[in-house]
Image (spheres, grey):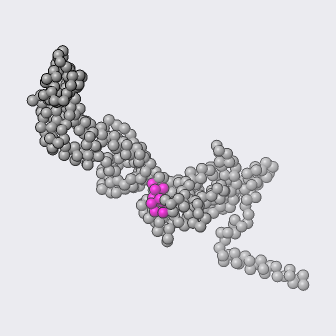
């Protein structure tokens, strides 16, 4: 055997601590490297019964042939006389197998070179497997990373064991990334490569919003409040639908927090992205109304409600049309993603014009009739300021007074 000292064992223990690669796996790699080097040394002759071993106590490595104990040797590569065998192990018997040390005296340099190559390769394989297993299991979860470098089309983010790629289409629009910035990202994909696995992360995934709410709102983690749906346009606006399993807990108020403290923390984390917290309900009309907030709705009628198609007609006041649709259609687009309903928004004037047109043609669609029936005065009164409402009441009272005198 070759004396290498205990430094080798200490190095394997250090690798286990730093890289997370088990000490046994490294020692097995060294043994494989020894066998490979020995086979090259003897040029591939009679190599079927070669093994390698490491003595951790004495710090020695060696190559051995497994030979059968016999009385008459027919092949010196596979058999050994019982007298010679008992010099190695006094208790050996005929027919037993024994390991015979065949480590060459000049084997040190060759073995070291071969071991270096094999160990390096095995460490890379083990490290690749560890990273792959870790991040495949963390796919879809939130991690904190440090920006290492910024390239033209992507940002390289260190997330612990490896560097991840934040592609351009997964970055928040208008966001400026600087080296050593700490950012929260979501692991969206892990791809196997010839070297280390390629981890793809995102800053626009709605799961980031979900995990931030779970961190900031204890009721969500406890299961009292449930996040039903999230629709997000990163960097601009997010809508999140929440419901409560406890009638005594207001889901919207719990997410906002005392004086808005909880929602403000999340908004700061998302770089001032606007967040609309929507109350979830099983009633489609009410759910769509909540999702289109802050726009005021006059009426909602369900046009079609099947597993394949869900469509609703929404009527809003003329001055609320742009608010309901949002800038470049953002509000209605987010509401559609949040609810899963196709939402057709009409202004009141356009809706009345359509009514008149259909009335002339005597072909008034059923959904239009439902929308007309849904338009009740209380929907418009709800939004009239108190002062105007009181003035209207006074005018009505003055008009009624003369009629009362005539009756007397």
Rendered position, 81 above or below 206: above
Horizontal placement of 10 versus 374: left or right?
left
Please tell me whether residue 87 belongs to the stretch shown in magenta. no
Image quarter (top left, top right, bottom left or bottom right) of the C terminus:
bottom right
Residue at 53% of width from left, 66% of height from top? 254
Residue 362: image location, x then y, percent: 81, 49
Rendered position, 166 above or below 216: above
User: As rendered, which of 144 and 269 lies closer to the eye?
Assistant: 144
Residue 145: image location, x then y, percent: 35, 53
Quarter assignment of residue 34: top left
Residue 213: image location, x then y, percent: 48, 59
Per the picture, the main secondary structure of the magenta-coloured stretch is helix
Rendered position, 167 above or below 374: above
Residue at 54% of width from left, 57% of height from top? 226
Quarter assignment of residue 353: bottom right
Residue at 39% of width from left, 53% of height from top? 143
Report the magenta residues as a range.
Answer: 208-218
Please tell me whether residue 209 belongs to the stretch shown in magenta. yes
Residue 294: image location, x then y, percent: 58, 63
Say whether residue 123 is visible.
no
């Amino acid at each position: 055997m070759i004396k290498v000292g205990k430094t080798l064992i200490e190095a394997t223990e250090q690798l286990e601590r730093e890289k997370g690669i088990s000490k046994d796996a490294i020692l097995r790699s060294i043994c494989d490297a020894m066998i490979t080097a020995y086979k090259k040394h003897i040029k591939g002759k009679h190599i079927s019964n070669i093994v390698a071993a490491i003595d951790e106590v004495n710090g020695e490595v060696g190559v051995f042939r497994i030979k059968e104990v016999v009385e008459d040797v027919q092949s010196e590569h596979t058999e050994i006389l019982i007298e010679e065998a008992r010099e190695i192990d006094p208790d050996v018997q005929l027919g037993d197998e024994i390991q015979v040390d065949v480590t060459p005296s000049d084997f040190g340099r060759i073995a070291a070179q071969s071991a270096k190559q094999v160990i390096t390769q095995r460490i890379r394989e083990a490290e690749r497997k560890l990273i792959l297993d870790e991040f495949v299991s963390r796919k879809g979860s939130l991690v904190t990373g440090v920006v290492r470098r910024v390239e033209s089309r992507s940002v390289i983010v260190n997330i612990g064991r490896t560097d991840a790629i934040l592609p351009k289409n997964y970055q928040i629009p208008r966001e400026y990334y600087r080296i050593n910035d700490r950012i929260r990202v979501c692991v969206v994909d892990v791809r196997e490569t010839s070297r280390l696995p390629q981890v793809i992360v995102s800053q626009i995934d709605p799961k980031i919003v979900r995990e931030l709410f779970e961190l900031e709102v204890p009721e969500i983690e406890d299961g009292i409040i449930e996040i039903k749906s999230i629709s997000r346009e990163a960097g601009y606006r997010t809508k999140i639908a929440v419901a409560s399993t406890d009638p005594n807990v207001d889901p919207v108020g719990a997410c906002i927090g005392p004086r808005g403290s909880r929602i403000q923390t999340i908004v700061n984390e998302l770089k001032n992205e606007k967040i609309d917290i929507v109350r979830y309900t099983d009633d489609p009309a009410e759910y769509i109304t909540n999702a289109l907030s802050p726009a005021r709705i006059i009426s909602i009628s369900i046009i079609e409600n099947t597993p394949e198609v869900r469509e609703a007609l929404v009527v809003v006041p003329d001055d609320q049309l742009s608010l309901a649709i949002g800038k470049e259609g953002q509000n209605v687009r987010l509401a559609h993603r949040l609810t899963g309903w196709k939402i057709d928004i009409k202004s009141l004037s356009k809706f009345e014009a359509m009514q008149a047109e259909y009335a002339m043609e005597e072909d008034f669609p059923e959904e239009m009739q439902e929308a007309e029936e849904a338009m009740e005065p209380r929907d418009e009164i709800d939004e009239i300021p108190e002062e105007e409402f009181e003035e209207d009441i006074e005018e009505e009272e003055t008009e009624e007074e003369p009629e009362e005198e005539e009756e007397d």
